Image (cartoon, rainbow, N blue to C red):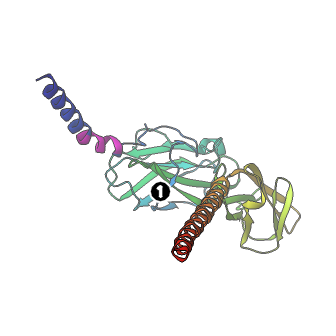
């Protein structure tokens, strides 16, 4: 009777897990609205198939004037689960809040708070979120980017790395130009062959740009697109510093640095596993052939002994 009671309890526990596990899994990745740096939440790393677009009500605002930035997310894997969207001023894990670049959020998509991160608890396949901001108080060129995070048990993410560019100031004359490395992103783990893409803002009058890795020149390019192919197998596993430097026609320079982590260990381990498998397989085959030869020789010897006995009779 006691065993039957335990079986009943176990059955109820299994039924409870099956009932509540899907909702718990669906809510994976949900966080509270607030101010988050570009790399947060850090658990979201799997690339989403969603599409992100960004627009603004004014791309040439006066210092301190108000404008609206709108982010739209469509598609992806988050249907029925939480999805969050953030706007940031840099593609770095720190100093990436809009306020770090001089922006002031006056209202976020809730219309009641001023956070750079907004979340819906049940995404239905399309989301449009708008922030009202005051432009920086200093003339110049600025960029804003977007990132979305969501979880259906896989903690997906996607990024609008091209961003949107603003020229602040009625004179329309930026104080300089900037370099943005759109891919890979700071902190990314890479392997095999990758493409390093860089954009200059403004893009006009760039004489040349060059990529260095750990201080060593990779290639100098004199025309767009500024993209470099890099075989990471030529670099040791671990962190490396990528730096893109651009020079304009007046000799002015700007640069951007990011850190990436090279991890080709998986490919090496796969190759080692293949080599070990082939080696073991070869040994097994040679052993089988050797045993077969021994058996054939023993049978042959037995037959010859029988024949010799018959001839002796």
* 18, above or below 159, in the image: above
x and y, in percent, of residue 134 in the image: 56, 47
Q: Residue furthest bottom?
A: 311
For the stretch drawn in magenta, the main secondary structure is helix
Residue 16 % position (x, y): 22, 36
Kindly indicate the quadrant of the structure image that contains residue 273: bottom right
Residue at figure coordinates x 62%, y 54% from the top left = 266
Magenta includes 272? no
Left or right, 280 with respect to 310, comes to: right
51 or 57: which is nearer to us?
51
Q: How many numbered tags mark residues here?
A: 1
Q: Which residue is mark 1?
A: 70
Residue 195 quadrant: bottom right
Whether residue 239 sits left or right of residue 83 in the image: it is: right
Q: Residue furthest front?
A: 313
Vertical position of residue 149 compared to residue 280: above or below: above
Horizontal and vertical percent position of residue 255: 79, 56
Q: Residues within 10 Å of mark 1 (few under 14, many from 20)?
A: some
Quarter containing the N terminus: top left
Q: Which residue sits at x=35%, y=59%?
A: 125
Q: Is residue 21 magenta?
A: yes
Q: Describe the element under mark 1 as helix, strand or loop.
A: strand
**Residue 146 spot, x, y in % from top left:** 53, 54
Q: On the rendered structure, is 197 left or right of 21?
A: right
| Range drawn in magenta | 18-25
The single residue placed furthest to the top in the displayed view is: 2
């Amino acid at each position: 009777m006691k065993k039957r009671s335990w079986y009943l309890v176990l059955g109820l526990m299994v039924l409870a897990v099956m009932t509540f596990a899907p909702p718990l899994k669906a809510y994976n990745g949900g966080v509270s609205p607030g101010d988050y740096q570009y790399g947060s939440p850090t658990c979201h790393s799997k690339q989403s198939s969603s599409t992100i677009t960004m627009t603004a009500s004014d791309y040439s605002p006066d210092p301190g004037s108000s404008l609206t930035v709108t982010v739209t997310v469509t598609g992806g894997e988050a249907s029925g689960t939480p999805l969050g969207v953030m706007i940031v001023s840099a593609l770095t894990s720190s100093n990436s809040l809009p306020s770090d670049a001089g922006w002031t959020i006056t209202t976020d998509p809730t219309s009641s708070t001023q956070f750079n991160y907004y979340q819906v608890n049940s995404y239905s396949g399309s989301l449009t979120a708008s922030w009202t901001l005051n432009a920086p108080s200093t003339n110049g060129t600025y960029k804003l980017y977007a990132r979305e995070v969501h979880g259906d048990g896989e903690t997906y993410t996607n990024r609008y790395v091209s961003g949107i560019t603003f020229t602040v100031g009625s004179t329309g004359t930026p104080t300089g130009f900037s370099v943005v490395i759109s891919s890979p992103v700071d902190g990314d783990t890479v392997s095999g062959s990758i493409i390093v893409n860089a954009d200059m803002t403004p893009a006009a009058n760039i004489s040349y740009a060059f990529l260095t890795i750990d201080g060593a020149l990779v290639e100098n390019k004199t025309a767009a697109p500024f993209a470099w192919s890099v075989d990471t197998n030529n670099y040791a596993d671990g962190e490396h510093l990528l730096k893109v430097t651009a020079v304009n026609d007046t000799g002015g320079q700007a640069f951007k640095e990011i850190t990436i982590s090279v991890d080709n260990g998986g490919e090496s381990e796969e190759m080692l596993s293949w080599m070990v498998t082939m080696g073991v397989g070869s040994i097994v085959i040679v052993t089988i052939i050797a045993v077969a030869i021994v058996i054939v020789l023993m049978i042959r010897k037995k037959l010859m002994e029988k024949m010799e006995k018959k001839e002796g009779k």
